[in-house]
Amino acid sequence: MSEIQLPPYAVRRRPWLWPAIIVTAVAVLALGAWLIWRPSSEDAAKAQGSDAAKSGKGAGKAGKGGAGVQPVAVAVARVGDINIMQTGLGTVTAIRTVTVKPRVDGQLQSVGFDEGQLVGEGALLAQIDPVPFQVALSQVEGQLARDVATLNNARLDLERYRTLLAQDSIATQQVDQQASLVKQLEGTVKIDQAQLDNAKLQLSYTRITAPVGGRIGLRLVDPGNQVHNSDSSGIAVITQLAPITVLFTIPQDTLPRIMQRLKAGDKPPVEAWDRDQKNLLASGTLLTVDNQIDVTTGTVKLKAQFANGDAKLFPNQFVNVRMVVDTLKGVVLVPTAAAQQNTQGPIVYVVKDDSTVAVRPVKMGPTEGPNAAVLSGLQAGERVITDGVDRIRDGAKVEVTTPAGGARAPRDPNAPDAGKRPDWKNMDPAKREEYKKRLEAMDPAQREEFKKRREAATQ
């Protein structure tokens, strides 16, 4: 077969075809990419507006020197009474703790209580074998009956002898001897009667009863064991739980106030709290004060009594004691969060009517719970900052977000610190502009704190 020969012009045109195709494909792809990823006019306008706002905000802050309106929470100082509390560490002590012991020797026959049971006074706790004591009682009763009969016979003989003496039939000496015999027998009968009473008493001791009411502990002796009145451990221990006392100590400097109240017949109220001072266990009154001060610690012991009807206090339990020493009446009260400290001493941040802050040195008094007493430097009705004082300085401008008492007062719904989002559609243009300026004046930390407060208020 002969080979086909192409014309010379065809061979010369073929090297230009493929470069043209490649260039065309690249152009098409570039055009498609530009059409897909090009920025829209609206996005460009937004970007330009954002850059302008940022530059304007930075310029505004620079012109103000970085100052902003700080949102704060305030409370109104009020007049009230506050208790002067004295705290101390105390130990619960039972009024009576009794170890139940047998009073006679014998075999423990039975036990009549459950461990941990609340028993009343006189309740049967245990029984000792009574047979030996019953036998001893019968023996004494027989001896008494014999001696009583002998005494009666002697008395009859004495009457006969006196009759014969009146007839001058016998000597006086014989009558006197008979009278002496009667007295001896009378003494014997009294001894027998005492022995009979003792035998009955010993028999009654075989029934072991509760000397006091309270909670009985674990059983120390099991039935069948031989018990003795000399045993030191006893059968069980009874602890009286209601009422119950607490022993605690206070500094000796507080003692004069306590003694003054006790002398006036007043019993200061006392509270017993748990170890973490979170739960109130019981409320009672001061019972007495020890008769001397511990010179090593400078403290004095006090005893308070609690009804303990719910048995929340247990012997040897550790408690925190709070006692009302005195009550200050008609003093200025503020939340404890309002009291601050600087190099000059205690201060409060007072918010004036023009929403500026004044640093006010004050003299603080006692605290009770969430309240603190201000003895001088603050008047009732003034507003003090309770939250948001971290970046507050004297003369700074603030925005009050929470009024006194923690309850939100009726506010302008379009205000920046209102408890809901502003209604942009119905807001007055001037207020809208003012709102924006206040938000722009805040630094990022202030804006974040404001956001959290607004979200908390809307919940």
Image (cartoon, helix red, strand yellow):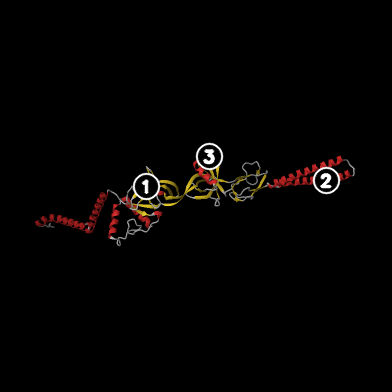
Extreme residue toward the left, this view? 8
Residue at 55% from the left image edge and 42% from the top image edge: 290
**Amino acid type at image mark 3:** Ile
Q: Nearer the viewer, mark 2 or mark 3?
A: 3
Q: In this rendering, does residue 370 appear at all? A: no
Q: In this rendering, does residue 375 appear at all? A: yes
Label 2 sits on residue: 155
- Sequence-first disc among 2 and 1: 2
- The picture places residue 199, in percent across and down from the top left corner, at 72, 45
Give neighbour class at mark 1: few <14, some 14-19, many 20+ (Cα, 10 Å): some
Extreme residue toward the bottom, this view? 426
Which of the 4 image quarters holds residue 291? top right
In the rendered view, does 305 fall on the left or right side of 123?
A: left
Q: Is 3 located above or below residue 247 in the figure?
A: below
**Amino acid type at image mark 2:** Arg
Label 1 sits on residue: 360
In the rendered view, does 378 fall on the left or right side of 424?
A: right
- The picture places residue 334, in percent across and down from the top left corner, at 41, 50
Q: Which mark is residue 293?
A: 3
- Sequence-first disc among 1 and 3: 3
Gap between marks 2 and 1, in whole Å?
106 Å
Which secondary structure lies at badge 3?
Answer: strand
Q: Nearer the viewer, mark 1 or mark 3?
A: 1
Which secondary structure lies at badge 1?
Answer: strand
**Amino acid type at image mark 1:** Arg
- The picture places residue 259, in percent across and down from the top left corner, at 53, 44
- Sequence-first disc among 2 and 3: 2
Which of the 4 image quarters holds residue 459? bottom left
- The picture places residue 438, in percent across and down from the top left corner, at 30, 54
